[in-house]
Image (spheres, rainbow, N blue to C red):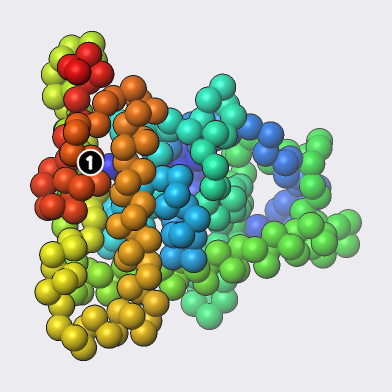
Amino acid sequence: MAEQPPEMLKGPVSLTSSAHAGVKVKDIGDASHIAPCHFAKIYTPEFSKAGVDFPIIFVKDPDTGTFFAAVMWGIEPNENLFVENNTWQGGYFPASVRCYPFAVQPDPENEERLFIGIYEEAGVVNKEEGNLVFNDDGTETEWMQNVKEFLVRVWQQEERTKLFVKTLEEMGLLIPQTLTVKNSETGENHDVSGFYVVDREKLSELSDDKFLELRKSGALECIHNHIMSLESLDKLLRKKNIRPPAQTVASQIEAGKSAAAADPSDA
């Protein structure tokens, strides 16, 4: 599994009043920009809400080797089962996606400052209609000030989530999983891999000190929300018209097995 930015856009460029004078951002009226995304980053404050609608998994970034938390939107790459006719049908909408078409990260020239960027090629960025980013005098509009405050809060949530995921990795709680599905047309099995979950057995084997550390930090609640969210894997399979086996996908994962799902015609 590999993360895909909306519309496969080029990286964001620094947002400045000189380079982006007159730029406007249209309200996003459809979800076509995330239709090719089969998962999206999620942050710990969102786990309880997002887990009701989607499985929360952990993915290793192939470039950095670090893990991040994500909600699973599809079984195959370029597949979002929660976008129908360019309309979002998925319930909770993750903060990481609500940042679009902006991005926030530490300034490469000064790590104490945040870099606010914009995806210039995004379909909602133009100079004809939408919310104006800068006033004529170069100051940020009230709309952009509100967006900026939101971006900073999201960055703080992401940093908190990085610490949470790093703790899981250091404690050896993350294990890889493979979801095996049968193609309804060819009858062939297909493995969906590249995602990780918390191993409940390893969690139960932690020392009292480590367990207390997780509870005091709030990580234990996030782990429970993650484990509960795995029940949504069955809902995801049904959206793809795949019948989960008698033993649910979530229960197989909890048992430390590779999850398998059959084609509906196999009943």
Left or right: 94 in relation to 15: left
Estimate the x, y position of residue 18 in percent, counting from the top left.
75, 57
Residue receiving disc 1: 249
Q: Residue at x 54, y 47 (%)?
A: 92
Q: Residue at x 12, y 74 (%)?
A: 205
Q: Residue furthest top?
A: 185
Q: Quadrant of residue 174?
A: bottom left
Q: Is residue 208 above or below residue 30?
A: below
Q: Secondary structure at mark 1?
A: helix
Q: Residue at x 37, y 36 (%)?
A: 235
x and y percent of residue 70 in the render?
A: 38, 52
* Residue type for callout 1: Val
Name the image quarter holding the N terminus.
top left
Seen as rendered, the residue at the extreme bottom is 209
Task: Bin the neighbour count of mark 1 within 10 Å (Cα to Cα): few under 14, some 14-19, many 20 and up.
Answer: many
Q: Position of residue 198 (x, y in %)?
A: 23, 61
